Image (cartoon, rainbow, N blue to C red):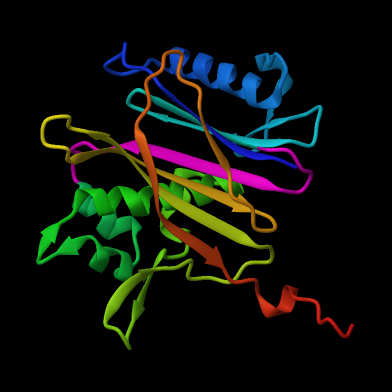
Amino acid sequence: MSYSLGLSLLTNFEKMSKKHSSSEAIRILSILDNRKINMDDISKEAGGRPFFHDKDTDFNISHSGNMVIVSHVTKNGYRVGCDIEKIKPRKNIAKIAADKFSVSENKYLYTDGIFNNINFFKIWTLKESYIKLQGLSVFDMSKVPSFIKENDQTNSLDFSFCADTNKPLTFRLYELSNINPDTKTENTEYILAEAFKGDYLQPELIWLSPSSLTLDCKMIAEIKAAVSPAHTVSPNR
């Protein structure tokens, strides 16, 4: 079994067209699956989630700005989801959070009373990765469990998947940054989240840009969901 995350950075476009991002995703998918992929090889679930109808491999695709991401796992019964978002101003961002995020998530978005855009995209991508893993719709966003838990003992807000699950679930959050050569400071350009359903496994991150262009990709959080006791088999049984 292998689990890979293919990343591609294209700087020739201010904003990629859907046609171009789809073409790049198919190119990456072909590399990860070690065969030439055509659109005819891909089917869609009732909710629109893509899958291969001819083999037991699961994948997911996301794009934003000039980035295209493909998550890919080669084992039957395992599922993946991914979402990437370019950090940029967004209209009514605080209202979106108030409508779609949990109370604890909304608390996490504010630092000293100031709305934190980067924290918004951390929560958004985590929720989207879960939605895409499950084959749901963005309209289900408000139904997705909270990814922030209030810790009364430490008076902190911690990453957590605040619901039980019937199978192991792991979420990882990444910052993709460029480094200013003059000041040596990092500028976060994208937030990436990936979701994995199955026994714990870390992905291999593979840069597949047409050129040598990359960004610094740093994992900033890993969240493991608790398997419900009702779905845990006793070792004595």
Asked if the magenta segment contains residue 75, the reply would be yes
- On screen, residue 231 above or below 68: below
- On screen, residue 231 above or below 71: below
Is 47 on the left-hand or right-hand side of 41?
Answer: left
Q: Which image quarter: residue 169?
A: bottom right
Asked if the magenta segment contains residue 88, the reply would be yes
Image x and y of residue 25, in percent:
53, 22
Q: How many marks?
A: 0
Is 93 on the left-hand or right-hand side of 218?
Answer: left
Q: Say which residue appears at 35% left-offset and 54% top-offset.
A: 123
In this picture, which residue range is highlighted in magenta?
A: 73-92
Image x and y of residue 231, in percent:
74, 73
Q: Which image quarter: residue 168?
A: bottom right
Image x and y of residue 136, in percent:
55, 46
Image x and y of residue 44, in percent:
66, 31
Q: Which image quarter: residue 110?
A: bottom left
- On screen, residue 223 above or below 44: below
